Amino acid sequence: MDEHRINRRGALAKLGGFAAVAFGGAMWKSDAEGAGPEAVASGLVTCVLTPEQTEGPFYVAGERVRRNITEGRPGTPLTLRLKVVNASNCRAIKNAAVDIWHTDALGVYSGVQGSSGTFMRGIQRTDANGLAVFKTVYPGWYTGRTVHIHVKVHIAGNLVHTGQLYFPDSVTDAVYRKAPYSRRPNRNTRNPDDAIYRNGGKRSQVKVRKNAGLYVASITMGVTR
């Protein structure tokens, strides 16, 4: 996809936005195509919504629509697979806008606090399977927060969810043993110590697998349209 700068409000109106909340693990336990809210309430279809979480202070308008958000920054390669489905029937949602931002490997956000560039920021549309894919690096850490990625989701121009995605501490420990993360040892906040994580973060934790030296992190986000 060609990279191009977009006005955030205009872009999100085109890309669509959705009131979404993310969760990991199995999304449904029924393949009944006609399932609706009653099926969800009865437990026939299970689409669990997770809590919204703070946007935080480092959101920057004017991001690019692009898959690769690294801008050449070093770090352990990470592929993010973020799937969006309708929480009423577990069906995939096409053309939703998924907007993410996070620190580089050294714990720096782009475009704030004297940092230039737009690295580790971007927007992707979901495909016919409800999937948005980003190529990035494993996030670094900074004082007072556990490792996380910020996410917004939109449908039809409306922002309906703001959240954060988290990683298992054991995976982070393994990644941080190698450069460039090893240049900053002794991270001071793990998942159980993070006040925001404690407020629903476990249900926003991605599933991670390692494949040929890179990591793939996946989560399904159930949304209310």
Image (cartoon, rainbow, N blue to C red):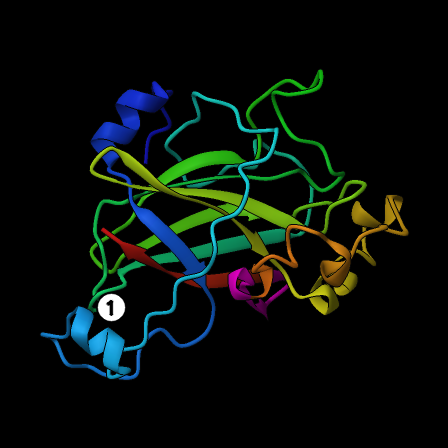
The amino acid at mark 1 is Cys
Quadrant in the rendering for residue 108: top right
Q: Position of residue 126 (x, y in %)?
A: 29, 49
Answer with left or right where residue 85 lies relative to residue 202: left
Query: In the picture, which quadrant includes the N terminus?
Result: top left
User: Is 156 in the magenta?
Assistant: no
Q: How many marks?
A: 1
Read off the magenta span: 203-214
Front-most of residues 188 and 224: 224
Q: Please rate how many residues cluster around mark 1, counting C-alpha atoms within 10 Å: few if below 14, some from 14 to 19, many from 20.
A: many
Q: Position of residue 147 (x, y in %)?
A: 69, 51
Q: What residue sits right under mark 1 in the picture? A: 90
Kind of element beneath mark 1: loop
Quadrant in the rendering for residue 200: bottom right
Front-most of residues 32 and 198: 198
Does residue 95 appear anywhere in the picture? Answer: yes
Q: Position of residue 158 (x, y in %)?
A: 27, 35
Q: Is residue 45 above or below residue 100?
A: below
Quadrant in the rendering for residue 12: top left
Answer with left or right where residue 81 lies relative to residue 6: right
| Residue at image coords 51%, 37% | 69
Q: Is residue 51 above or below residue 54?
A: below
| Residue at image coords 70%, 51% | 195
Front-most of residues 50 and 173: 50
User: Is 212 in the magenta?
Assistant: yes
Does residue 138 appear anywhere in the picture? Answer: no
Q: Position of residue 84 (x, y in %)?
A: 32, 56
| Residue at image coords 31%, 56% | 223
Answer with left or right where residue 167 lies relative to residue 45: right
| Residue at image coords 37%, 32% | 65
